[in-house]
Image (cartoon, rainbow, N blue to C red):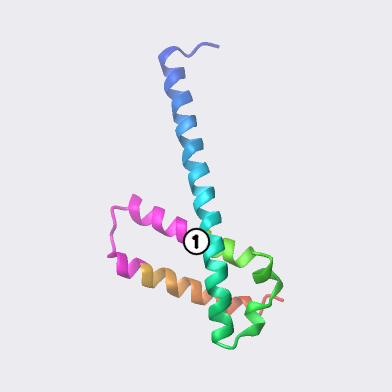
Amino acid sequence: MDFGEGGFLLDLFFVSKGAELTFVIKMQASLAEIVSERLQALAYALESQQIAESRVFTDGFVPALLAAQLVDTITWWLEQGRPYTPGQIAIDWYRLMCSTLREVSVWE
């Protein structure tokens, strides 16, 4: 089936969406690595070995979850025209992260 010029635009749309998805996946993977390292140190500093040594933390699930939440938060913030200051969005994500970490200790 030939979609003519519309087909080209549709192909271009899917290629750009694929590139965008690839970027998001790579960004989340990088952030998950950084989050994992920093949270591991934070958990030990706070003497919260239960969190630092939990299966969902050490297997990478929690860092991946937090990284995805951060990327989604930034994406939402940008798409909405930055309705909050960068500082406020950072504080809100930090609170979300802390809330998630508190819950991790009761998951197992």
Q: Is residue 74 highlighted in magenta?
A: yes
Q: Which residue is mark 1?
A: 69
Left or right: 107 as drawn, with respect to 102 = right
**Which x, y percent locates residue 36?**
57, 68
The question of residue 64 being in magenta is answered with: no
| Main secondary structure of the magenta stretch | helix
Q: Residue at x 50, y 76 (%)?
A: 98
Q: Is residue 49 above or below residue 28?
A: below
Q: Quadrant of residue 56?
A: bottom right
Identify the element where label 1 is drawn.
Answer: helix
Q: Nearer the viewer, residue 105 or 49?
A: 49
**Residue 73 placement (x, y as % from top left):** 42, 59
Residue 45 place in picture, x, y as percent: 54, 85
Q: Amino acid at mark 1?
A: Gln
What segment carries the magenta color?
A: 69-89
Whether residue 100 appears in this view of the structure is: no
Q: Is residue 95 above or below residue 65?
A: below
Q: Residues within 10 Å of mark 1 (few under 14, many from 20)?
A: some
| Rendered-image quadrant of the N terminus | top right
Please name the residue shown 49% across and 30% down the image: 15
- The residue sitting at the bottom extreme is 47
Q: Is residue 75 visible?
A: yes
Image coords of residue 22 (percent x, y): 52, 42
Left or right: residue 24 versus residue 82 is right
Identity of the residue drawn at 54% across and 74% down? 39
Check the picture and name the quadrant holding the C terminus: bottom right
Image point 66% across, 83% down: which residue?
Answer: 50
Q: Is residue 39 left or right of residue 54?
A: left
Q: Quadrant of residue 52?
A: bottom right
